[in-house]
Image (cartoon, rainbow, N blue to C red):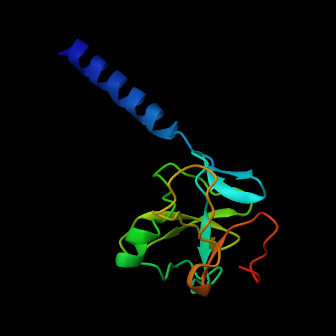
Amino acid sequence: MRYFLTALVTILVAACAASKATPTAPPPIKITGGVLVNLNRMTLYTYDRDVAGSGKSNCNGQCAFVWPPLQAGDYAEPSGDYDISTREGGERQWTYKGKPLYRFSGDAGPDQNTRNGMNGVWHFATPRSTSAEL
């Protein structure tokens, strides 16, 4: 019995130590050709109907199917101009200077940004943009 209790205490201490060592993930974003892209070099876009700093996305339902949000995993950590907002369904989304970031489902490959200006409300995200410009 004594060995059992010692083993149980050891396991509990190890589990507590492991829970404090949660890995964090930096923003999965880089700059290519003056445009923000994800790690697969897919162009990232902003939506004019999103309000910078509001913490919410106005692209949901069918819109989010066409313009998938750049999801932030459970261990993602904000860094600099990159933050995380929570979408209406509870999933986490990366933002740049307060504006949610999206991909375009029709972009066939890396570095495409042919949807800039689509419907007058979708624009590729650039590192020189400010919250007021986005």
Choose between 98 and 44: the one closer to the eye: 44
Percent from the top left, x then y, of residue 39? 60, 45
Count of labels in the image? 0
Choose between 63 and 110: the one closer to the eye: 110
Residue that extends furthest to the left in the rendered view of this protein: 1
Q: Residue at x 34, y 30 (%)?
A: 12
Percent from the top left, x then y, of residue 123? 65, 74
Residue 10, picture quadrant: top left
Above or below, 89 against 109 in this view is below
Percent from the top left, x then y, of residue 22? 50, 40
Above or below, 46 against 25 in this view is below
**Where does the N terminus fall, quadrant-wise?**
top left
Above or below, 15 against 57 in this view is above
Residue that extends furthest to the top in the rendered view of this protein: 3
Q: Residue at x 53, y 63 (%)?
A: 103
Q: Is residue 110 left or right of residue 17?
A: right
Q: In this view, does 71 lie to the left or right of 95?
A: left
Percent from the top left, x then y, of residue 130? 79, 75
Residue that extends furthest to the right in the rendered view of this protein: 128
Q: Is residue 62 left or right of residue 47?
A: left
Residue 3, picture quadrant: top left
**Where does the C terminus fall, quadrant-wise?**
bottom right
